[in-house]
Image (cartoon, helix red, strand yellow):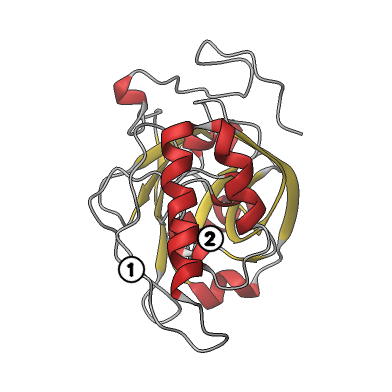
Amino acid sequence: MVSGPPEWSNRGVNETSGTPVGRRVVLGMLGLGAAGIAAGPYLQRAVEAVTSKDPTGLADLLPGGGGFRYYSVADSVPERGPADYTLTVDGLVDRPATYRLADLMAMEQTRIVRDVQCVTGWRVPATPFEGVRLSRLLEAAGVRKGATAVRFTCFDGAYSESLTLEQARRDDVLVALRMQDRPVGHAHGGPVRLYVAPMYFYKSAKWLSGITVTPAVRPGYWEDYGYDVDAWVGRSNGRDDAPTS
């Protein structure tokens, strides 16, 4: 879910076990982040030079850490984990289901490595995602006759997305539990997010909590503001980016 105006995460820097982080390191990293906002792509590489070797986890607080920009359409988003995360599958299905994080982790996992492309122009090359193919959850639910689309809702309470049923059944669409070879963190939409590899990243909804099979496509959050419903990289939104690969 990475379209629209960027916002800082509401998380603070929490004390955790491990190597202590000096105050100068923290201020230096945050200074680079602020400079990156002001100077744009010219200082982005400097931010990435720091965050690519960051053992502290503070890189997740920077707006350009690891090449990603962080966006949210909600003022704040609650954190969820193994104890309280659930994903519902319902709508036009024969067998509605609710999955806990452990249930999803126990299923067969698929790994995809593609570029991530934002409709605003930035790209992060060769980004690994791992998770359960959305098609497997739809098959388990038993899609009913008359269904043509899938709607996705999120536990931020604001965001939504959708795909046609044909798009949702592609092999490169995941309910993702891992990103960049580690569990999907809260800032990246964890513990579970959608990943739609061939489309602009706003289709890959963060903080996924609901999958509803519907009789027709319902435009998602940014589509209501003019973004294309079919968001193929390089073939939509008036852009000519190279397809993600």
User: Quadrant where the N terminus lies?
Assistant: top left
Q: Amino acid at mark 2?
A: Ala
The extreme front residue here reads 24
The answer to whether residue 13 is left or right of residue 238 is left
- Measuring from the top left, give residue 112's x and y in whole percent: 74, 49
Front residue of 232 and 4:
4
Q: Quadrant of residue 169?
A: top right
Residue 171 on image: x %, y %: 71, 43
Location of residue 196 (image quadrant): top right
Q: Nearer the viewer, residue 69 or 55?
A: 55
Point out residue 192 in the picture as x, y percentages from the top left corner: 50, 61
- Under mark 1, the amino acid is Gly
In the rendered image of this protein, does residue 166 appear above or below residue 151?
A: above
Q: Say which label, 2 or 1, has the lower sequence index.
A: 1
Residue 237 position within the rendered picture, expressed as x and y whole percent measured from the top left? 50, 15
- Up/down of 75 relative to 185, above or below: above
**Residue drawn at point x = 26 percent, y = 48 percent:** 74
Q: According to the image, label 2 marks what residue?
A: 59
Toward the left, the furthest residue is: 75
Q: Residues within 10 Å of mark 2 (few under 14, many from 20)?
A: many
Question: Neighbour class for label 1 at 10 Å: few (<14), some, many (≥20)?
Answer: few
Numbered circle sitting on residue 187: none
Q: Identify the secondary structure beneath mark 2.
A: helix
Q: Quadrant of residue 161?
A: top left
Q: Residue at x 45, y 79 (%)?
A: 82
Q: In the picture shown, does residue 153 fall above or below 55?
A: above
Q: CA distance from mark 2 to mark 1?
A: 13 Å
Q: Residue at x 60, y 44 (%)?
A: 67
> Label 1, on which residue?
12
Q: Is residue 146 visible?
A: no
**Residue toward you, 80 or 89:** 80
